[in-house]
Image (tube, rainbow, N blue to C red):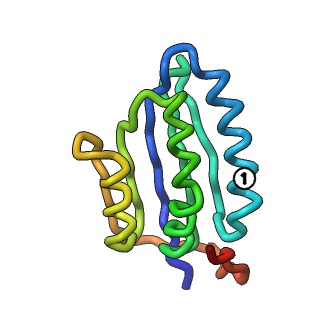
């Protein structure tokens, strides 16, 4: 059975950087799509006044999320040319301790990393045959 992990990251945008961030995000999404065949969903959502963005990721398992975090490590530094601050990281599922630690290190003590474990429901996600490239 597939045990997905969902990560919702919320950030505030620097004033006047919305259009630059949109361009950066489009390029980053293309890079992620080309290099992460197992990532099920990767979208970004912006609030009405263009000051806050939420990034939603659905991974088929913890290995996919760990690979994603390794892959984008350099790009996240570039993202903060446009992002003012991280507001929160919410993980739904059963992440490894290493994933939680990486999020805590990336965010610092002032940004909450919230983990919520499943307790009821179902999913219909098929097991994905492709695996991530190793690096």
| Quadrant containing the C terminus in the rendered view | bottom right
Q: Residue furthest left?
A: 109
**Residue 132 screen position, x and y as percent:** 66, 75
Q: Secondary structure under badge 1?
A: helix
**Quick one: 106 or 131, which is closer to the camera?**
106
Give x and y (percent) for residue 42.
Answer: 63, 52
Instruction: Kindly identify which residue carries mark 1.
Output: 31
In this view, the residue in front, 106 or 60, is: 106
Q: Residues within 10 Å of mark 1 (few under 14, many from 20)?
A: few
87 left or right, relative to 127 = left
- Using the image, determine if residue 27 lies above or below residue 18: below
Please determine whether, in this image, residue 17 is positioned above or below residue 71. Answer: above
Q: Residue at x 32, y 71 (%)?
A: 97
> Along the line of sight, which residue is nearer the eye, 111 or 105?
105
How many numbered marks does the figure carry? 1
Taking the image as shown, residue 28 lies to the left or right of residue 58, namely right
For image coordinates 52% across by 71% down, the residue present is 4
Q: Is residue 108 above or below residue 82?
A: below
Residue 108 at x, y percent in the picture = 28, 46
């Amino acid at each position: 059975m597939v045990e997905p992990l969902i990560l919702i990251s919320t950030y505030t945008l620097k004033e006047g950087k919305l259009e630059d961030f949109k361009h950066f995000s489009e390029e980053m999404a293309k890079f992620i799509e080309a290099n992460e065949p197992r990532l099920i969903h990767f979208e970004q959502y912006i609030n009405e006044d263009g000051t806050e963005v939420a990034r939603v990721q659905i991974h088929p398992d913890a290995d996919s999320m760990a690979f994603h975090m390794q892959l984008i490590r350099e790009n996240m530094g570039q993202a903060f040319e446009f992002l003012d601050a991280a507001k929160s990281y919410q993980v739904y599922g059963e992440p490894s301790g290493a994933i939680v630690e990486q999020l805590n290190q990336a965010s610092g003590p002032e940004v909450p990393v919230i983990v919520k474990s499943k307790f009821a429901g179902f999913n219909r996600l098929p097991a994905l045959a492709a695996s991530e490239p190793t690096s």
